[in-house]
Image: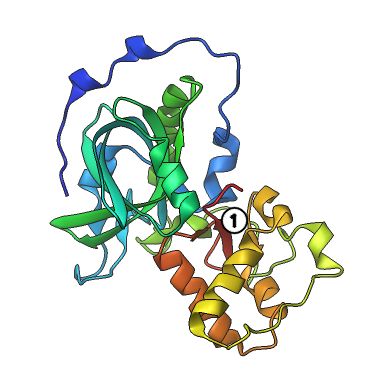
Amino acid sequence: MMFGSQPDSFSPSQFTSSQNAAADSTTPSKMRGGSSTMPLTVKQIADAQQSGTGEKGAPFLVDGVEISNIRLVGMVNGKAERTTDVSFTLDDGTGRIDFVRWVNDASDSAETAAIQNGMYVSVIGSLKGLQERKRATAFAIRPVTDFNEVPLHFIQCVRMHIENTKSKVGSPARTISAVGASFSNGSSESSTPTSLKSNPAPVTSGTNGSETDLNKQVLNIFREPAYLESEHGVHIDEVVKRFKLPAEKIKEAIEYNVDVGHIYSTIDDYHFKSAFTD
């Protein structure tokens, strides 16, 4: 992964007044515990340390907090399209980082086609790999239409840094979802849309019972309108209730969709949201 400082390519003079508010910017008061997606800069990612002994798969730490999903805002450079993926470099003024966005279907293609070099985007993704070789995978990429979102993102990064460094208690490695989150033992009651609590539509297994069918059926639940509108997505237990199958099978399908970038975790390890917007 490439990290580097390129301040000249990130120009504040490109900011313009906008008639629309940022589409999905998170207010500072909602940052802690409201989502496990942490706002970061490229410099913070470059400085992130791997927890434990640095073995493959160990999470990375920023300010002593384990990071699950990351959100960055910056300018796209070096976009390269292939059959299975699109790669690009994101420059946020503090450095550069390489991203890959896997292309699995038409909606992925449409999302990546809208991204062009020189465009400012908001990226949600994950950080994997080893200390000396970090890999950033994008789950969702959205063009920035209101440039107020760019300085707002940096304000969120500063506030997150301040809150994480001033309140270190207990274990030196904490997860962002464990701080200020309003849940207990993974309870799903706090964030499941009311419209789906009373009479959720049951889902039967696929026609041929294949693993591919199950992965698709599980993804379709996360793409239901009520869950797309929910800030926290859907709890694992709610998905399990929709199938007449062992919970482990459903969890495996959820893990598959996370791995390929179709869904991502939100307020904790039990809530997930679709990376697709429609």
Spot occupied by residue 102 in the image (x, y as percentages of width and height): 35, 56
Classify 157 as above or below 84: above
Q: Residue furthest right?
A: 198
Q: In this orientation, which residue lies closer to the viewer: 89 or 164?
A: 89
Question: SS at mark 1?
Answer: loop
* Residue 273 placement: quadrant: bottom right
Left or right: residue 174 compared with residue 186: left
User: Looking at the image, which residue is at 61% across and 73% down?
Assistant: 217
User: Looking at the image, which residue is at 21% across and 46% down?
Assistant: 47
Do we see residue 167 in this rendering?
A: no
Q: In this orientation, which residue lies closer to the viewer: 33 or 97?
A: 97
Spot occupied by residue 63 in the image (x, y as percentages of width and height): 33, 48
Q: In this orientation, which residue lies closer to the viewer: 153 or 97?
A: 97
Q: Amino acid at mark 1?
A: Ala
Spot occupied by residue 270 in the image (x, y as percentages of width and height): 57, 68
**Other residues around mark 1 within 10 Å, as few (<14) / some (14–19) / many (≥20):** some
